[in-house]
Image: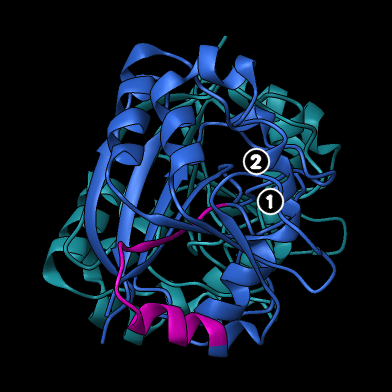
Chain colours: A cyan, B blue
Amino acid sequence: MRKLMVFNQVSLDGYFTDRVGDMSWARRRDPEWMKFQSENAGGDAELVFGRITYEMMASFWPTPQAREAMPQVADAMNRMRKSVFSRTLEHATWQNTRVVKGDLVTEVHKMKAEPGPDLLLMGSGQIIAQLTQARLIDEYQIVVTNTVLGSGRTMFEGVTCLPGLTLTKTQSFDNGNVVLWYSLST
Amino acid sequence: MRKLMVFNQVSLDGYFTDRVGDMSWARRRDPEWMKFQSENAGGDAELVFGRITYEMMASFWPTPQAREAMPQVADAMNRMRKSVFSRTLEHATWQNTRVVKGDLVTEVHKMKAEPGPDLLLMGSGQIIAQLTQARLIDEYQIVVTNTVLGSGRTMFEGVTCLPGLTLTKTQSFDNGNVVLWYSLST
């Protein structure tokens, strides 16, 4: 079975986007953080998104601006296989992307059983909440930033209490980010 | 000026209480965590609460059960000076407690200028949100627990975006807690 992982930055009050979907408050461009992101994105993975996150990512990573600002991450994001869950999207224009229309939990069960690299969720709050509830996410990499938003969206909206994730690693950065790694207890 | 500090445990999705005000999901009683809590509570401080948190604390810490479960913390909680902000509470029965009825921001400005030990806020989400907005909180000690709640109350509800808190220290524990210390940038 390949693993299903989450990587998201959250505000100090737990939101991965602000109220209007903006994530720019989480952006850090200092060398230490850029190096971590490049190394973290460097391994092979298949990316999984909801439609909203897909459209945001697809409008950024293939552009010259992205390649200039974060060449290694942009190259990895464009190169990796991607799946977007959407009932409305007909066709995905971003390279190496397929649209998945079936039931989320059923399809993710199938994807985990297929051969291939680990699966990585980014953004995609509604999908993360449903897959958390179904206990299908094996690892959460959560970056706690030093910004309070006051309102926004969490990636666990409506999840029934999930205690006892295992904290496996932490790493803090000079820019104020703290990365927390949790795995699902079995 | 004495410092105003916050100490709160939050769920992985950022809530310090669940939807019905319960905080028992945050309780950990392993020796390593008990030792940290005892040492952390051992210094002198004046405690500051809103009424709801005050009533919860006042119904627990003076009891024999509290003295038995956490003797050092119970002793410190009962001994320390306490201020509770409330418009409705007439009289505080917990030892060493005064009721403050004036405007929150004005009164806290005054308290910070008075001589005495540092001021420590626990629980008290509405008060923390207002004092964060007024930029009166000098240090936040936030314990991120390994529990997802799915819904609850944050201590920053309605705060306008506050970027750039300075991460000064982190400490992780075998029980899955990670303590993050932030100071307000000046």
Locate the C terminus of chain B and report the quarter of the image it occupies.
bottom left
Residue for badge 2: B57
Q: Position of residue B27 (x, y in %)?
A: 57, 26
Would residue B171 be counted in the magenta stretch? no
Look at the numbered discs 2 and 1 and tell me whether their residues touch, using CB distance below 8 Å.
Answer: yes
Q: Give the spatial CA distance, label 2 vs label 1.
A: 6 Å
Q: Position of residue A74 (x, y in %)?
A: 33, 67
Label 2 Cα crowd, 10 Å radius (few <14 / some 14-19 / many 20+): some
Residue for badge 1: B53
Q: Chain of mark 1?
A: B
Q: Position of residue B42 (x, y in %)?
A: 30, 37
Find numbered disc 1 in the image and state the secondary structure of the residue it sits on: helix
Q: For residue A129, which numbered disc appears in the image?
A: none
Find numbered disc 2 in the image and state the secondary structure of the residue it sits on: helix
- What amino acid is at disc 2? Met
Which of the 4 quarters of the picture holds residue B143?
top left
Q: Residue at x 53, y 69 (%)?
A: A57
